[in-house]
Amino acid sequence: MPAHRSIRHRRVRRKIHKDFELQLTSMMDILVIILVFLLKSYSTSTNSFSSVAGLQLPISKSQELPPDSLHLIVTPEAITFEDARVVEFLQTPDSLSSSQATYSFKPGDLTEGNMLIAALFDSLNKAREKAELLRQKSPARDEKGNPLPFDGILAIQADKRVKYDTLRKIMYTAGAAQFRTFRLLATRQDQ
């Protein structure tokens, strides 16, 4: 008799397995939950700040990400605005052989009492005019129906060895081109 019961149990077990079907609604629920989680945790930003070789950024403990803005890089060799070299610094044999950069401007690069960097001013003006034109055509409007004003945010990625005088000239030039908010980028310190 015990052998007869075990055979009957096997037959019943086989019938259960034959009738089993995969529940697609449960699988779809799982996939939807995973998709929603990935969409909520995904952040988008048009900015992609990458480090330039030989550039030593200051260190910061801030965890904030910089907002979308135009990008200016100051290296020992040049000033780069939106991936285009705008101003080349005057290099001396001492600055090329040592790790100390001079950040000296070439004659004719500076105007307005040696404060305004002419080539940088022209590039910043073109970028501002382009941004204002895009805002004019954009459907986004303020409460009065006017186009949104130019925000004038400039992210500056400068070597920590840059002298204050050079940064002051860069910020003066950007201010003359109606860029009023500066974000000085730094390397995030891991705690």
Image (spheres, helix red, strand yellow):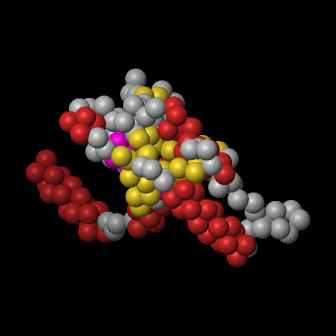
Q: How many marks?
A: 0
Q: Quadrant of the C terminus?
A: top left
- Place of residue 188 in the rendered image (x, y in percent of width and height, measured from the top left): 42, 33
Q: Residue at x 47, y 28 (%)?
A: 60
Q: Residue at x 44, y 40 (%)?
A: 158
Q: Per the image, is 83 magenta?
A: no
| Residue that protrudes farthest toward the left in the picture | 3
Q: Residue at x 13, y 47 (%)?
A: 2
84 relative to 94 in the view: left or right? right
- Place of residue 43 in the rendered image (x, y in percent of width and height, measured from the top left): 50, 52
Q: Residue at x 54, y 62 (%)?
A: 123
Magenta segment boundaries in residue numbering:
75-81
Considering depth in this image, is 10 or 86 the residue closer to the camera?
Answer: 86
Considering depth in this image, is 183 or 190 the residue closer to the camera?
Answer: 183
| Residue that protrudes farthest toward the bottom in the picture | 137
Q: Per the image, is 79 magenta?
A: yes
- Place of residue 165 in the rendered image (x, y in percent of width and height, measured from the top left): 52, 34
Whether residue 51 is visible to the viewer of this picture, yes or no, is no
Whether residue 182 is visible to the viewer of this picture, yes or no, is yes
Toward which corner of the image does residue 94 lie, by quadrant?
top left
- Place of residue 150 in the rendered image (x, y in percent of width and height, measured from the top left): 70, 59
In the image, is residue 79 above or below residue 137?
above
Considering depth in this image, is 161 or 59 the residue closer to the camera?
Answer: 161
40 relative to 187 in the view: left or right? right
| Residue that protrudes farthest toward the top in the picture | 191
182 relative to 151 in the view: left or right? left
